[in-house]
Amino acid sequence: MLLFGLGFVGTGHEVYGNWIVDYAFALVFGVIFQYAAKVAMSDDSKPKIWWQAVKTDFWSLTFWQIGMYGWMAISIFVLFDEQNMKPDHWAFWLMMQVAMVAGFMTAYPINWVLISKGIKERM
């Protein structure tokens, strides 16, 4: 909710604009954190570690957001009206919890693939 109330519009609707900017910031910070974790544990070159961090975080975050944004879109446009789906309303936070479970369910398979291919480390 980085841009809550700023009125940035993407594809004709404010919520999509907010999601686009939030996704971009999350991806940048996620790649930086992935790199920081990988560089301490690897003897590979820094460009190779950056590329691994980008691959890891891009796929994990993208699939997480598909589930999370997908559920929130259903919540906003189907289950509730848009006024009740603002961060100052209880329905938003209830649906956000469900959205996090949806994000986990969509991210789990891609993370399994990334780990099995050696792109992502087991924890």
Image (cartoon, rainbow, N blue to C red):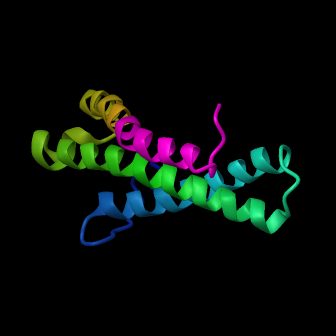
Apparent side of residue 32 relative to residue 1 in the rendered image (left or right): right
Can you see residue 107? yes
The location of residue 81, given as percent across then percent down, is 13, 44
* As drawn, 95 above or below 39: above
Image x and y of residue 64, in percent: 42, 46
Query: How many labels were placed on the picture?
Result: 0
- Picture quadrant where residue 67 is located: top left
Q: Quadrant of the C terminus?
A: top right
Q: 9 and 55: which one is in front?
A: 55
In terms of image quadrants, where is residue 5? bottom left
* Residue 2 drawn at (x, y percent): 49, 52
- Give the residues drawn in magenta, as a range: 103-123
Asked if 12 appears above or below 16 in the picture, the reply is: below
Q: Residue furthest left?
A: 78
Q: Was residue 122 drawn as part of the magenta stretch in this picture?
A: yes
Image position of 39 (left or right of 27): right
Per the picture, the main secondary structure of the magenta-coloured stretch is helix
Residue under the point 25% across and 65% down? 13
Between 118 and 81, the one nearer to me in the picture = 118
Identify the residue shown where x is 69% and y is 49%: 34
Residue extending furthest toward the front? 117
Q: Is residue 2 visible?
A: no
Q: Is residue 106 magenta?
A: yes
Query: For the point 42% across and 63% down, which residue is it?
Result: 20
Q: Position of residue 100 (x, y in %)?
A: 38, 34
Give the residue at x 58% y 53%: 57
Q: Residue furthest right?
A: 43
